[in-house]
Image (cartoon, rainbow, N blue to C red):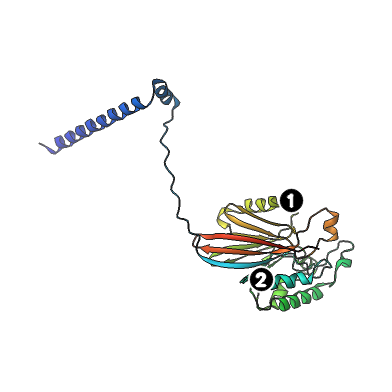
Amino acid sequence: MTKSKKIIKKLKEKQVKQKEVKNKLAEKISDTFSKKELQAILTSGKFHEVPQVPSYPEINFKGKTVKFGVLTDTHIGSIFFHEEWLKAAFKMFREEGCKVVTHSGDVTEGLSNRPGHVYELTHIGYDQQKKYAIDLFKEYNKTNLPMYMIDGNHDRWYIKSNGALIVKDIVKELDFAHFLGHDSGDFKVNGAKIRLWHGEDGSSYATSYRLQKLVESITGGFKPDLIIAGHTHKQCYIFERHIQVVSGGAMCAQSSWMKSKRLANHAGFHIVTITTNKKGIARCNVEWLPFYG
């Protein structure tokens, strides 16, 4: 038998087998569905496959655990700042075994052109507020916990008026502190990406809405694992687009301006515990410690 004849023979045998499989499949389909159902399948233009059971990745909640002390909006230099609150926060950070302290902006009260603002200051001007902040952090961060800080809109009043970078200059005098940037800054802990953010927007009607819009605005490839936000003096925690998001409240009391605008002030601080693994943050525990008064 020639080579070409062998090929033709094999093709015919294959066609016969395919026909047998099709006939058996047709018999099974006709036994499974009624005539009306078969007619509906033929005229729908769709082939309905049997759904497959999805596969899921292995879950691992083990890893390296780190505790954060979370501060924001201290407004040092304002009559609404309470020094004893800052002292209490650092005492708690030490007792709870925190390894890192973050500050999400408005470290100082600044000095604006708003009428009457100068009368709400205990320390007036760049030099006095800078020195007061340096002295406080040196005194109360007794174990030199690493501090990661950004500036906020109140701090940046000095930039706008005369180009002074008050938070960056405060950090220069503190061996344990790191300045991450204006309004936003990133750092890593055990591979997990942490972002501090302040913003110049306002409070939202629903406390979580501002945080949701913030996460929505982040491009996919630039998402952090944890965002710690400041500015609005509202404490909140959400999980959105696989990002842990904490809004830090404030380390000061409600100001006269906030009262006039009917804006609530959540005074206090957070202790945030994260467990990291190769995937990022496997576990996140957020504890809010409020001040009353």
The quadrant where residue 35 appears: top left
Position in image of residue 144 (x %, y %) = 65, 77
* Residue 165 in sight here: no
The quadrant where residue 85 appears: bottom right
Measuring 65% from the left and 70% from the top, which residue is drawn there? 101
On the rendered structure, is 56 left or right of 188?
left
User: From what the image shows, is residue 57 above or below residue 96?
Assistant: above
User: From what the image shows, is residue 169 above or below residue 263?
Assistant: below
Position in image of residue 43 (x %, y %) = 43, 23
Position in image of residue 292 (x %, y %) = 78, 62
**Residue behind mark 2:** 93
* Residue 264 in sight here: yes
Return the mark for residue 40.
none
Type of amino acid under label 1? Ser
Viewer-side label of 1, 2: 2
Quarter of the image with the C terminus is: bottom right
**Residue behind mark 1:** 204
Secondary element under disc 2, as helix, strand or loop, is: helix
Question: Which of the pair 38/201 is nearer the observer?
Answer: 38
